Structures are given as structure tokens and as C-alpha cells.
Image (cartoon, coloured by chain):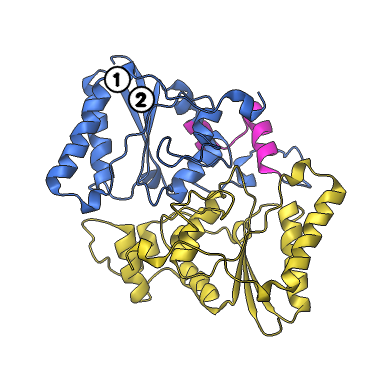
Chain colours: A yellow, B blue
């Protein structure tokens, strides 16, 4: 939709991969709609996945006992997180739509993306794929907890075992979905009382 | 047990944390038994969690289309993985017992440990906690797939909400368990046919 800002968090090493194609059609389709598209290409950026005390610039709140969660929260309030985190948080805050584009390995995510979620959003949450690999208990993990409205995932199964034609159809169906993604309703998530709120 | 080699993969930033205490009692108890204990302290080592083409020294098998899985497997056979991976793989191969010691955040693991598993064992598998957070489908993920016999996990729930006394009891129960860990039977895992073997 014209004027909307979209952020794509992209985690694949090879631009010519199936993931690369999905990212490319998304950028093309969203540009066609008049959106502003930003891509955080995590491998190309050499994004730091380690959550360490280096993430906090300035003095620690408790230097004698380092707790990443406590220190990151204090530093967030004081705007003293490292610039790579602040940059990503700014992109997230400005975005109307955030797309995570990554290979799904046996229902897990690349460590570089796990690190992005730990450092930019909130350390520690699991990532689960609603309706597919959700334990019920954990429903929608980090994204919902951090205030996202979560849309249904787009999953392309086993592209390495699909024919060229089938892969093209998977890519086309993603581009097709993006045409009307702005009209989609969020999927139901764990109620906030679950998180003590 | 005297003469046994134990490897502890330890992923916590703060030595004085609850995780640090669990690691320390394990080292002490295993030393007492006459074991050789090696600790891979991932944060202290600044272990690289990103799985990239830098992991392959020497020429790529297909430089025009980078597939981490393919290249890492070829490099494994040719012994041309980077030295940090080779070092860890050697430790794993020599160990009679491997202990993963890490904080469990909403059933997920720190990115640095996910990266260790992706690079040293096998990219992409999810980590699941048998009998606690297993989907049934994925049972025991990377460890079982890579040929480990998996023992029941030792889980200390919510140490930050426990009293000092309760935390001490959790630490003591871990030390106690280690006294007879050599007699434990592996838990049942997904049969190998599931992985096409």
C-alpha cells in the first residue's frame, strides 16, 4: 500500500537461493505498491548474534553481577545500547509491516536470526510457527510478546525437493499474497495475562 | 568415573550466576571422580555463532551457489573447516559425556549456543527438551540425529524466583546426580528411520 514502510529481516547467505528469490519478489511487489522497503540482510551486514556486555555502552547498572536482561533494559531506557541494536530497533519502530525471511531448518531458525531477536527484541524467547510448530504453551513467542500483531506464516515446504516449476509457483504465491496482505487479520495469540500483564 | 572425559558446553556471561554455580559444581564433582573435564566457555571464547562461508577454508565445492550444508559437509570430509570448528568437533569426539549448561529462556537457547550447534554439529536442528518441550515430532533434534545417546535433562526451574536455600538445593541435586550419571540409561528418541536411515 502506497506510503507504507516495510522492513524485511533477511537471513540467507546466498542471494540466488530460494530464500533470495522470495525476498526479491517481496521487494519488487512492495515497491510496485509504492511502499518504502528496507532490508536488513543479516549475513551481508555480518550482524552480531552474541548478546554480551559489549551491547551496553556506558556504565553497567550492576558491574559486579552481569545480567543481560537487566542491563539491556536499563540501556534501552537510557538509549545506551550499541548502535547496531538502536539502528534495528528504529527500523522496527518505523515499520508498518515486518517480514522475517529465512530458511526453516527442522523448525528452527539460523543462529544469526536468533541473535537478532535476542538483541533487538527480547532475549530468550523461542520462535514458533503458529499452527505448525507451536506448543500451544508458547504461542508466537517473541513477536507477540513484543507487541507485534502476527499474521499467518507463509511456509514453502522443502523447496530443495520441489521441481523448478513448483518453486516458481511458491514464489508467485508469496508475491500474490503480498498484494492483499494489508487486509489480513492477525492470528489469535496467547492472551497478555499469560505474560503477567 | 575415573579416566572418563567430560566436555561441558557452557553458555553464560556471568561466572557468578546460577548457571556458573552449576558449571562449577559439575567440574568439582567430576574432578573428584577422576574425570578429565574440558569446558568450552562460549562467551569467554567469543565463540562465532554465524554459519558463513568463512567456515570453509580452501576452495568451495560450488562457489557460484553457496549452500552451507553442502559446503560444510564437503569441508568436514576434507578437514578444511575453520580451526574453531575442528577444535570443538575434536572435543566432542573425544568426550565420553557432553554436558550443555545454559539458561533456558522460555524454552529457547542463547544464540551463541544455537550457533555452536549449527556449526559444530549440524546446521539447523531445533533444540528440544525431552519430556518438557518436545513436539513429539522433533524428538531430541540435533543431539540424537548426530549420534548422541541422550540422557534426561536436568532442569532447575525459575532460579530467579527461588530462595537462596532452594537454589542451593538445586545445585546440590545436580552434583548428586553426577555421582551416578554413568549408570543412567539414555531416554528413548525418535527412531532413525525417521531421518531416512
Q: Residue furthest left?
A: B165
Relative to residue A151, is residue A51 depicted above or below?
above
CA distance separating discs 2 and 1: 7 Å
Packing grade of label 2 (10 A; few <14, some 14-19, many >=20) is many
Label 1 chain ID: B
- Give residue A21's position: percent from left, percent from top: 76, 58
Query: Dot 1: what SS?
Result: loop
Which residue: 46% across, 23% down?
A: B149
Query: Dot 2: what SS?
Result: strand
Q: Quadrant of residue B33?
A: top left
User: Viewed as shown, does residue A30 lie left or right of A116?
Assistant: right
Relative to residue B113, is residue A39 depicted above or below?
below
Relative to residue A190, is residue B32 depicted above or below?
above
Residue B75, magenta (yes or no) = yes
- How many numbered circles does the render carry? 2
Label 2 chain ID: B
Question: Is the residue at mark 2 from the same chain as the one at mark 1?
Answer: yes
Looking at marks 2 and 1 on the same chain, the residue that comes earlier in the sequence is marked by: 2
Specify the segment rendered in magenta. B67-88
Q: Which residue is mark 1?
A: B35
Which residue: 77% across, 66% down?
A: A175
Q: Residue furthest right?
A: A165
Which is more toward the observer, B1 or B103? Answer: B103
- Residue B193 seen in the current view: yes
Q: Are marks 2 and 1 in contact (CB under 8 Å)?
A: yes
Quarter holding the N terminus of chain B is: top left
Packing grade of label 1 (10 A; few <14, some 14-19, many >=20) is some
Quarter holding the C terminus of chain B is: top right
Q: Residue furthest bottom?
A: A3
- The numbered disc on residue B6 is 2
Amino acid at each position: 500500500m502506497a506510503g507504507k514502510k516495510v522492513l524485511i529481516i533477511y537471513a540467507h547467505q546466498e542471494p540466488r537461493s530460494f530464500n533470495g528469490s522470495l525476498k526479491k519478489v517481496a521487494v519488487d511487489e512492495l515497491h510496485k505498491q509504492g511502499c518504502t522497503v528496507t532490508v536488513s540482510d543479516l549475513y551481508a551486514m555480518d550482524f552480531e548474534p552474541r548478546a554480551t556486555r559489549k551491547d551496553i555502552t556506558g556504565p553497567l547498572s550492576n558491574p559486579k553481577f552481569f545480567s543481560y536482561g537487566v542491563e539491556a533494559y536499563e540501556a534501552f531506557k537510557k538509549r545506551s545500547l550499541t548502535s547496531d541494536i538502536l539502528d534495528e530497533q528504529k527500523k522496527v519502530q518505523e515499520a508498518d509491516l515486518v517480514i522475517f525471511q529465512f530458511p526453516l531448518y527442522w523448525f528452527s531458525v539460523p543462529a544469526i536470526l536468533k541473535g537478532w531477536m535476542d538483541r533487538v527484541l527480547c532475549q530468550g524467547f523461542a520462535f514458533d510457527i503458529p499452527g505448525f510448530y507451536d506448543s500451544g504453551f508458547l504461542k508466537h513467542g517473541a513477536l507477540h510478546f513484543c507487541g507485534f500483531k502476527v499474521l499467518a506464516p507463509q511456509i514453502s515446504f522443502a523447496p530443495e525437493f520441489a521441481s523448478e516449476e513448483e518453486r516458481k509457483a511458491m514464489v508467485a504465491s508469496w508475491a500474490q499474497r503480498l498484494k492483499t496482505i494489508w487486509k489480513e487479520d492477525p492470528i489469535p495469540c496467547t492472551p497478555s495475562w499469560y505474560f503477567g500483564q
